[in-house]
Image (spheres, helix red, strand yellow):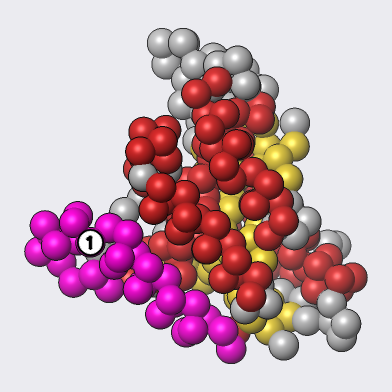
Amino acid sequence: MTYIAYLDEFGHIGPYIARNHFQHNDSPVFGLAGLVLPIEEVRNFGTWFYQRKCELLKFEIDRSSMHPSVWEKKGSALYTVRNVETYRELRNFTNRLFNKIRALGGFAFYVGQGKHATPEHHDANALYRHILREAIKRIDQHCEEDCNPCEKFLLALDEHDQRSTLVTQASIAMYGADQRRHLVEPPFQLESHRYQTMQAADWIAGLTGRLGAYWKAPDEYSENEIFATYFAARLHRCATRSGIRD
């Protein structure tokens, strides 16, 4: 069997000092999150997600002039405190999403890093490369150690302006000292609005970004406790080899 991992960014790639800092205040974490599916279940999941998206966000979709298949709502805009408090449908959908991923033999996945470097020492591109290598390592380890027989995987990322560098980094991980033997090809990049699977990854990343901020800076992001209350246990049950490190 071959998996496809769909990953998107969560948090913020830039430096972080404090939430009340005049400039560096976006998020205390950065990482990649999404879902990993058996390749034969990708179309099944994409259809299911498209149908649920159209139900959940019918009002917004109807107001747009776009076909629902290419209409998207970013996870950071969907998973707000107000939306989670107000709309039980969103809470129910999120639980159904994790259940669906597991029912299809897939899993949720996230890997991130708490940010502590000073702005003058913060290297955003190096951080992204580090997170990407860690994501490849963990999924590769899952294929090697958790699956019987061992599995392979492909990796799809949302579009990124450092595409050349990231593909090079993945190639080094595959064929260099890391020898990530279960990654079939270097990552390919997708336009999220054209892929239901990548939109689902973006929603999981949006939720993980809220949780990560609360986990790493609970006093500064106390309002995000609601995400932990409703979704943390569900995410943990669905996720494999995931975590946000300091």
Out of 32 and 109, give the one closest to the viewer. 109
Q: With respect to residue 94, does 86 lie above or below? A: above
Image-based side of 160 in relation to 145, left or right? left
Asked if 191 appears above or below 151 in the picture, the reply is above
Our reading of the magenta stretch's main secondary structure is helix
Query: Which of the 4 quarters of the picture holds residue 39?
Result: bottom right
Is 52 part of what is drawn in magenta?
A: yes
Determine the secondary structure under disc 1: helix
The residue beneath circle 1 is 58
Q: Residue at x 78, y 56 (%)?
A: 241
Q: Quadrant of the C terminus?
A: top right
Percent coordinates x, y for residue 168 in the rendering: 62, 62
Q: Relative to 181, say whether 198 is above or below.
A: above
The boundaries of the magenta stretch are: 40-69
Answer with left or right where residue 65 lies relative to residue 81. Answer: left
Label 1 packing within 10 angstroms: few (<14), some (14-19), many (20+): few
Q: Is residue 84 left or right of residue 234?
A: left
Q: Position of residue 234 (x, y in %)?
A: 64, 52
User: Which residue is located at x 64 percent, y 75 percent?
Assistant: 103
Q: Measuring from the top left, give residue 123's x and y in whole percent.
A: 59, 33
Residue depicted at 57% across the width and 42% down the height: 230
In terms of image quadrants, where is residue 170?
Answer: bottom right
Q: Amino acid at mark 1?
A: Lys
Q: Residue at image x 84%, y 77%?
A: 147
Tally of numbered tags:
1
Camera sees residue 135: no
Q: Is residue 20 left or right of residue 58?
A: right
Pick the quarter of the image with the N terminus: bottom right
- 198 versus 245 height, above or below: below
Q: Nearer the viewer, residue 240 or 139?
A: 240
Residue 130 belongs to magenta span: no
